[in-house]
Image (cartoon, rainbow, N blue to C red):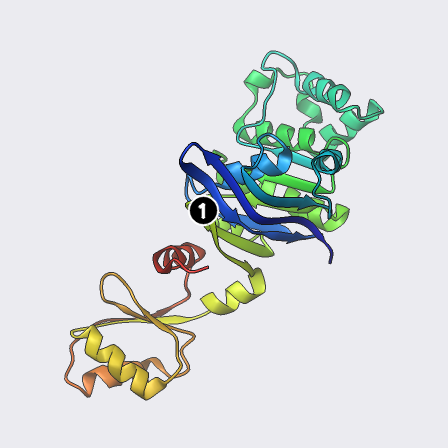
Amino acid sequence: MDTVIETRGLTKRYGDFAALDGVGVSVRRGEIFGLVGDNGAGKTTLFKLLCGLAFPSGGEMRLFGEHAQADLERQRSRVGAIIEQPGFYPNLSVEKNLEYYRIQKGVPGKQVVSELLELMRLTHAKRRACKNLSMGMKQRLGLAMALLGEPEILILDEPITGLDPSGIVEIRALLQRLNRERGITIVLSSHNLAELEQLATTYAFMSHGRILEQVSAERLVARCADCIDIAVSDAERYTALFEKSFGQTRYQVLPDKTVRIFDPQQSIEAYSALASEQGMGIFKLERHRMSLEQYYLNLKERGIA
């Protein structure tokens, strides 16, 4: 697959504050790319730069292989986006809002509006004023606006924020269908990491304006597949024995002194026996799959790239 978005050393400064600090990401055609990060991590700033709503202080970004400013502007016609909250004229109807943005974008053919209303299941509400829409309907209308002009990339900033469970499932199914049936590359951020796990094919983890890691969903699943937590009376001594007994097996000592063993190659009894045979007390012994949230927190704590 060819690369449709690429940034290298991308920086955005506001005075002395670096909202983005040397960001490098690569998005391939056909991916659902999930950007993970806390509030203030730089996700929205990155999206604004990609969409031309702000300009970088340094570094380079490419859309469809182009990086010159004039070329970027031309390529942005192939990108649809919802940044922060979709913008509507509250007193205009759903249909008239779409028609307004169709004309503004220079998209020919009035039938496009009807097709998008049908796709987003908004035909029944086309005459309803936007101020009277539910949160889920507003999100669907925002997606309809982003799809004007048949974009090849959708950039969506927190598209499920504020939705109830039914609305989240609906938006998820819609994005999967757009990706599968229309081949649209989707780049989205979300605070709902459990939901993002059901969508993304690639992840980038972001903190304080930097990318900590970019990883495929397949590789991430392998890393999160299995772990054992063991809390003992002497964690320092236990880890020294652990390294001697189990060699290259990955582990991490958590802030509460729990030893987390990644991708364990031995039975849970083998790890507990190592402690009990040395007279150590065992306070916790659990086997579980690491969540995406925990993986991100571990990345932040380690501060790795």
Please report the residue visible at 69 percent of the width from the left and 24 percent of the height from the top: 124
Along the viewing direction, whichever of 290 and 73 lies nearer the viewer? 73
Q: Is residue 197 visible?
A: no
Q: List x then y, in percent, for residue 279.
A: 14, 84
Is 241 placed left or right of 300 in the picture? left
Q: Residues within 10 Å of mark 1 (few under 14, many from 20)?
A: many
Whether residue 86 is visible here, answered yes or no, is: yes
Closer to the camera in the image, 229 or 220: 220
Q: Residue furthest right?
A: 109
The residue sitting at 56% across, 60% down in the picture is 217
- Residue pointed to by mark 1: 37
Residue 15 vs residue 86, the one in the foreground: 15
In the rendered image, which quarter contains the N terminus? bottom right
| Residue 204 vertical position relative to residue 115 in the rendered view, above or below | below
Residue at (23%, 79%) from the top-left corner? 238
Q: x and y percent of residue 47 in the render?
A: 57, 38
In the image shown, does 91 or 184 lie closer to the viewer? 184
Q: Which image quarter: residue 230?
A: bottom left
Secondary element under disc 1, as helix, strand or loop, is loop
